[in-house]
Amino acid sequence: MLNAIWLGLVLVSVLYAAFTGNMKAVAAAGFANAEAAIALVIKLTGFMIFMLGLMRVASDGGLLAAIARALAPILRRLFPEVPPDHPAMGAMVMNLASNMLGLGNAATPFGLKAMVELNRLNPHPGVATDSMILFLVINATAVTLMAPTGTMAVRAAAGSTAPGAIWVPTLIASTCSTLTGVAVFYLLRGRARYAARPQAVSNTVATAEAPLPVAEPTPPALVTSPARSALAAGIGVALLGAITWEIASPGAGRSAGDAAREIAEHWLIPLLAASLLLVGLRGGVRIYESMVAGAREGLDVVVRIVPYLVVILVAVGMFRASGALDLLIGALDPLTSAAGFPAAALPMVLLRPLSGSGAFAVMAEILESHGPDSFVGLLASTIQGSTETTFYVLTLYAGAAGIRDLRHALPACLIGDLAGAIGATAACHLFFG
């Protein structure tokens, strides 16, 4: 599907430009956007490396393990058919905890392991069980509690005055997508159309014994000391006091609501950085070394997204320069604007389930064209974090367990994606007008 979309963008751009006299602009846009993609990568690299380093410090300090402990009772209720002491339960707990912290690289191996272990409980090999489907839906619409660092890095690189302003709206949007996806799962699982039907076993299909990537074990938190705990607690109390004072004493010309809005837009990132470092301090982590290790992972992420950014930005730039995008937006805008959704953000909704990197590149192009702090730019940024890449998650995880019949997983995930876009729109109107 992504191949067809990309090819269509380029071919339509050239054909439309040929008949409208915009070929010179299309050629110039191709070169300019390729250069802009590399410049964008250079701008976002530092911030992304820094934030992923902070996440590594907090993870080493025990934050991942703490969230996993909190999730375990909830997952036992969501997956009653999975024995509490089964390896699948432990893998699911670690997968979802990693996702909530935005640690996608750590979440994927745990997710693959969970699918393989769930398949050992599967009475119909090749057909997804209810537990598998629910696990896939939660992964494809995963709620991430941590700030969307990649999106904020692009916003900062594009000149945003408040790169972190989309954090809370993104959390709202992703919550909408997850809750809707789970609700649709329960609504559809009893339908005869989606009943589990045994399939013939094929030797060409991957089995549960297929080799899997091994998750790098999370380094155990060092034994904390009363002095470190007291210091971390003291700094945390001081920061909380500063927030309270800022809201309670907003100053002349500012209401408490204005102060709270300023905190949400400008304080969240510094407070997040301080909080993650305090977790590492309390856990006895060698913070500098852990920070550097996480930064290396951040650099790997940046390197991986470069080809996607260049390829997608060139295609979208050509499509815009040809005039075809303006034609499409003009045709759809009366319909989408009536629902409060600007048509300029529609490419994000269409591409997000297909390609995370592709949607990331489209978001960057929207921020460049409309401005990072415009409503369209804020909405595109929020949609980027509202859900995961549905088709990638389904393909990767189902393939690990040799699942060919996903039953109602796809409709549940896609409806969750749609709910995420609707939630993003509502949240942006609430926060940004």
Image (spheres, rainbow, N blue to C red):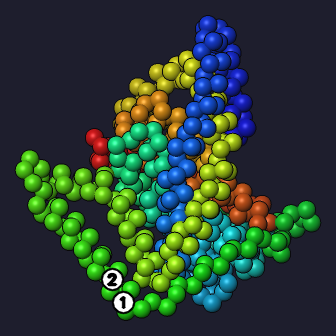
Residue farthest toward the left in the current orientation of the protein: 252
Screen quadrant of the C terminus: top left
Q: Where 334 falls versus 63 (above or below)?
A: above
Residue at 65% in and 79% down? 217
Q: What percent of the width, then of the height, locates residue 189?
A: 59, 65
Q: What percent of the width, then of the height, locates residue 100?
A: 50, 67
Q: Which class describes the residues within 10 Å of circle 1: few (<14), some (14-19), or many (20+)?
A: few
Q: On the image, which quarter does residue 134 sit in? A: bottom right
Q: Where 234 falls versus 349 (above or below)?
A: below
Q: What percent of the width, then of the height, locates residue 340?
A: 36, 36
**Labels 1 and 2 touching (C-beta < 8 A):** yes
Residue at 46% in and 21% down? 330
Q: Which class describes the residues within 10 Å of circle 2: few (<14), some (14-19), or many (20+)?
A: some
Q: Where 280 falls versus 309 (above or below)?
A: below
Q: Mark 2 is on which residue type? A: Leu
Between the residue at mark 1 and the residue at mark 2, the CA separation in whole angstroms equals 6 Å
